[in-house]
Amino acid sequence: MIGICFFDARAGQMMLGAVEFGAGRMDSAYRHYSTAVAWDPNSAPIRHELAVLLSRMGRPREAVEQLEAAARLDPKQAEFQFKLGLAWNEAGDLTKAAAALEQAVRIDSHHARAWYNLGLARHRLGQPDSAIEALVRAESISASDPSVPYARATILAQLGRIQEARQAARRAIEIRRDFAPAIDLLDELR
């Protein structure tokens, strides 16, 4: 009976936190999520939810702490590594962001957003060739997202590989005819 009450109380705190988060009452959501974590510190999903909230609140270092704990608790969950990579990026550590994103794609090689963000991180780390490889991988998984070939086009343009950049920009426009960033880039590359 105590276990049922414990679960119900923790679940209730999570539900209240979600309602408050959805209503934009971040401080109240934080109190509810923190209470749920205190009641069940070994729940990776609860720590993940708290991390998402902390990130939204502009507290990336605290989000990193929660996501690292979630990843330790459930090391086979690619989404935790993916979100950890995003949190490290928000915290300003691209090397750790790339490492977490690499771990995410090792766990789930079909995680398109992890490949995409890994490409962006590698580009910012001065690794354009491996950035392009990651973006090509993302595009092969999620062929309906114009931001992926557009990101590839911008990197290729910066490298002076204009013909390839044009092709990538055209691919973004094929996916979504009104994708303004790719249209503008293609105009610049003429």
Image: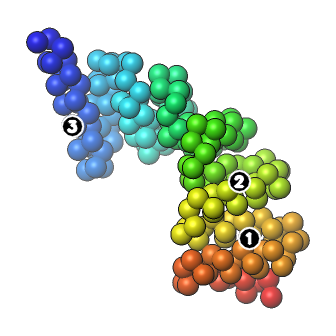
The three-letter amino acid code for the residue at tag 3 is: Leu
Rendered location of residue 17, percent (x, y): 26, 37
Rendered location of residue 15, percent (x, y): 22, 37
Residue for point 82% across, 56% down: 128
Name the residue at the right extreme.
160
The numbered dot on residue 16 is: 3
Q: Is residue 179 visible?
A: no
Q: Which residue is mark 2?
A: 134
Vertical position of residue 144 compared to residue 130: above or below: below
In the displayed structure, does residue 35 sit left or right of residue 60?
Answer: left
Secondary structure under the numbered disc 1 in the rendered image: helix
Whichever of labels 3 and 1 marks the residue nearer the N terminus, that label is 3
Vertical position of residue 95 compared to residue 145: above or below: above
Q: CA distance from mark 1 to mark 2?
A: 13 Å
Q: Which residue is mark 1?
A: 153
Mark 2 closeness class: few <14, some 14–19, many ≥20 residues within 10 Å: many
Please, which colouring scheme is shown? rainbow
Q: CA distance from mark 2 to mark 3?
A: 39 Å
Mark 3 closeness class: few <14, some 14–19, many ≥20 residues within 10 Å: some
Q: Viewer-proximal residue, 24 or 166?
A: 166
Rendered location of residue 94, percent (x, y): 70, 42
Whichever of labels 1 and 2 marks the residue nearer the N terminus, that label is 2
Secondary structure under the numbered disc 2 in the rendered image: helix
